[in-house]
Amino acid sequence: MSAVVQPTRPQIAVSAAIFRDGKVLLTRRARSPAKGFYSLPGGRVEFGESLHQALSREVGEETGLEIEIIGLAGWREVLPAAPGTGHYLIMSFAARWVAREPSLNDELDDYRWVAPDALAGLDDLKLTGGLEEVIQSAARLIGA
């Protein structure tokens, strides 16, 4: 099996803070990057795709959910931590759940609907950096 070759330039990615009944969806990464960490569903933007198209596609592929995108909640830059790791600019959006129940693909291995104000008390979960701030910003946009 050959090693994955990382791009030599920054990659644009999107993620969604999806709200349903006052709770936000957290998903756990089943593989690198961030294996074992809870984060928001999302992924890379493909050439020629708008951010919203990429977000709807990635959320559908990873979770099976249909969403309504509300607005940009924030962004985060992930710099290469070691040789062979990627450089990403992640645009995070607030979204509302519209239809379907979560059905995870092989990139994810767990999910939880969590109240945004309960994030600080989730010591048993490993969260990706900056996740709480993005979720709080998204909650304000949603009015949750």
Image (cartoon, rainbow, N blue to C red):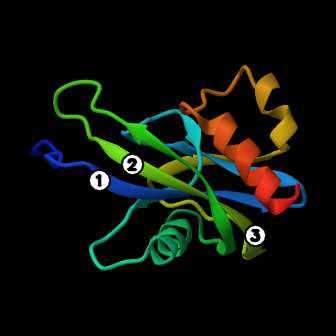
Which label's residue is closer to the chain start, 2 or 1? 1
Residue found 75% across the figure and 43% down from its top: 136
Q: Is residue 103 left or right of residue 124?
A: left
**Could you say which is closer to the camera, residue 97 or residue 105?**
97
Q: Nearer the viewer, mark 2 or mark 3?
A: 2
Image quarter in which the C terminus is found: bottom right
Residue 71 x %, y %: 66, 66
Q: What residue is shown with label 2? A: 89
Q: Is residue 125 left or right of residue 82?
A: right
Q: Is residue 62 left or right of residue 27?
A: left
Q: What residue is shown with label 1? A: 11
Q: Secondary structure at mark 1?
A: strand
* Contact (Cβ within 8 Å) of mark 2 with mark 1: yes
Q: What residue is shown with label 3? A: 97
Residue found 17% across the figure and 45% down from its top: 6
Q: Residues within 10 Å of mark 1 (few under 14, many from 20)?
A: some
**Could you say which is closer to the camera, residue 89 or residue 101?**
89
